[in-house]
Amino acid sequence: MFKRLSIRRAWSLIPITVAALWVVTACLSTPESPLPPEPPTPTAAPTALPPTAEPTALPPTAEPTAPPSPTAAPTATPSPTATPASSAPPMEIVVQYDFEDGLAGWTPRGQPSVSVVDDVAHAGQQSLLVTQRTAAWHGAAVDMSGLLEPGNTYEIGGYVRLVEGAPDSRVIISMQRTPTGGETVYEWIAPSAEDGVTDGEWVQLQGQYSFSGAVSELLLYVESPDAELVSFYLDDVTIGGRGQPPLQTDLPSVYETLSAYFPVGAAFSAAQLDSERHAGLLPYHFNSLTPENEMKPGPIQPAEGDFRWTGADRLVAFARERGMAVHGHTLVWHQQTAEWMFQDAEGNPLRATPENKALLLQRLETHIRAVVGRYKDDVAIWDVVNEVVDPARPDCMRRSAWYNITGIDYIVTAFRVAHEVAPDATLILNDYDTASPPKRECIYHLVQDLQAMGVPVDGIGMQMHINVRNPVLSAIEAAIARFAELGEVHITELDMSLYTNSTASYTTVPDEILLQQAYRYKHIFEILKRYADSIGSVTFWGLGDDLTWLKTHPTPRLNLPLLFDEQLQAKYAYWAVVDPAQLPVEIREMDSTPGTPVVDGALDAQWAERPWTKLLATGTTVVSFQTRWDADALYLFIDIPAKAQYLDTIEVFLDTNNGKTPTYESDDRRYTFQGDGCPTCADVTFVVTADAQGRRLEAAFPLRAEARVGTKIGFDLRLAASSQPDAPISWNDLTHAQKTDTSKFGTLTLAAAP
């Protein structure tokens, strides 16, 4: 299914030693905004565990739902008026607990005291009190069996408050679910913020939950996972449910739309196969599948010789029946590898000795021969080693147990054995933060030197866990271009967080943030298409926003990183990839810093001290601009290099009250500079200069509104050649309707001095 690229090699292994390997010393700096590594398994238990389990990790998101599968093929592109807004049916109340008539089925979870009290209540006269907790998972629970049905989405919420004197803590609403014939999972639904619940006021917890398949247990519970073991009140718990909207079977398929460029896949779990909606949507839009956790070393061989094939077998069979490719993930990783791999016969950690090195490499070889051998006829690509690079180290190598015991020989062994077992498979080295120059160069030189020694590395996997701002597009493109020198490039785990830090959180995601996400996806896929000859595949890390690791990492919060929303409906992000013309106009925002330049056409110190904004970038030709402001004027400097001087018409559009109206109002202005003149600039001070380096415009436009820090002004620029007036270049309104419509202008914010 995956296309074969001309850069494939016929590998011939050359005997090597660790001493023959390279050392990279150019680990210069950490990235501006470090990006997260690959997500851990989403089936780890939360701190709220039953008495027989230990608290270890954050919980997964809710399991997928299971209404009917789509059967119709895509037929036509919907109207441009289609939007990604949710079309979910209205919410209906399933059950409410106000504790006015007693416990109503709520019982202790563990051994705390659970009682109804009348001294504190959110509404009404009574609430539930949980005290005498002796473990973090102790709390209050109620049976949901028979109330909640698979295939529906539920809004679950309630009010919590700590007892007087208790230290600020977290309180979390969770679900304990045991699939029929399966293992129990613990799913956070509505976590509070860190230290988000106090003894001074009621805090509302609210979250969304869905699941698929039959269950033998479904227990809703409330706990405080912090070490302080606080006592807390619970009141006015409400559970509302809605059915799922039908899958959109009239949409263009993602993989069919991009078939001329590269295959497109998604990470998928065996549990999702039980959801007809998920199992129907996946092959409709994607023609490859990456097992999300089922092929990782720990899950597939938790004890020596004990291979758990069921989940991986189901996924591979599903893909085979539908003509989908399978991307194997992953043979070697420093996480999610069972402890026995690094222990001796007595369970002690292996020390770095020649004997233990030989033992560990033999275990690795046995593991790879078993896994790759079982799936060699179905898996076209393997992430052979995952996240082995650390640019903070002088030699760029992560100090994992693998490395500490074997040096770099574990990488060599993994590729050699995988190639012996599956000589036709594409074998790649997979890592995160690949757009960071230090990490990029570490990866590049590692693969380059491995290849020089005959190690069968066919290419590099770029995970691409990114956010709506970082890394910058130029860094992503530079990494793809660099890695393409060595072989195939695979985008292996693409998703896009709505957040640029670890602390922000939305209760409801603003529409403009989803649109910002979409345009970033658009720009990224423009890059990917340009490098289609080098890119072997593109894989999203998940199918829809209902099930994504980013809802719990790096902190529990609402995050919507994928192409389809929580009801598996197409988002702006989907249209950005399939048909960007369907997107609403993006409203760019930019800060203007204070200053009062002398309008003389000279590039003085005020303009030199701040970065430029690109209006046009073609090869080495860059048209760019800056703005400044003071109490009376908005200042603009546009720099047009010699190669772009054919752009002899400059239009500046201002909407000083930022009304964004579809027609002009009294405060709106359009200024047209042609050549060195401007017939519409009676109140504008400006200078146009031209020389061998190019042409420059410096101008001061009067502000017709109060100018202060935080003021927003509608703003746009448009450049054109007088010989081609119908082919303009605009900063924001790509429909080029600025002459009559201010609603698509960008926004300048008058900012304080940096």
Image: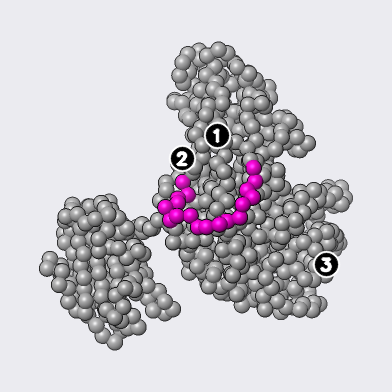
Magenta stretch: residue 83 in it? yes
Q: Indicate which disc, 1 or 2, sits on the residue closer to the N terminus.
A: 1
Tell me the kind of residue under disc 3. Val
Dot 3: what SS? helix
Q: Indicate which disc, 2 or 3, sits on the residue closer to the N terminus.
A: 3
- Look at 18% across and 52% down and name the residue there: 706
Q: Which mark is residue 507?
A: 2
The range drawn in magenta is 68-85
Magenta stretch: residue 76 in it? yes
Q: Which mark is residue 421?
A: 3
Location of mark 1 (residue): 242
Dot in front, 1 or 2: 1
Which percent across, then down, holds residue 436? 54, 65
328 displayed left or right of 565: right
Q: Report the Cα–Cα distance between label 2 and label 3.
A: 49 Å
- Look at 83% across and 67% down and name the residue there: 421
322 displayed left or right of 354: left
- Look at 57% across and 43% down and name the residue there: 246
Which percent across, then down, holds residue 597? 21, 68
The front one of 701 and 377 is: 377
Residue 645, above or below 79: below
Q: How many marks?
A: 3
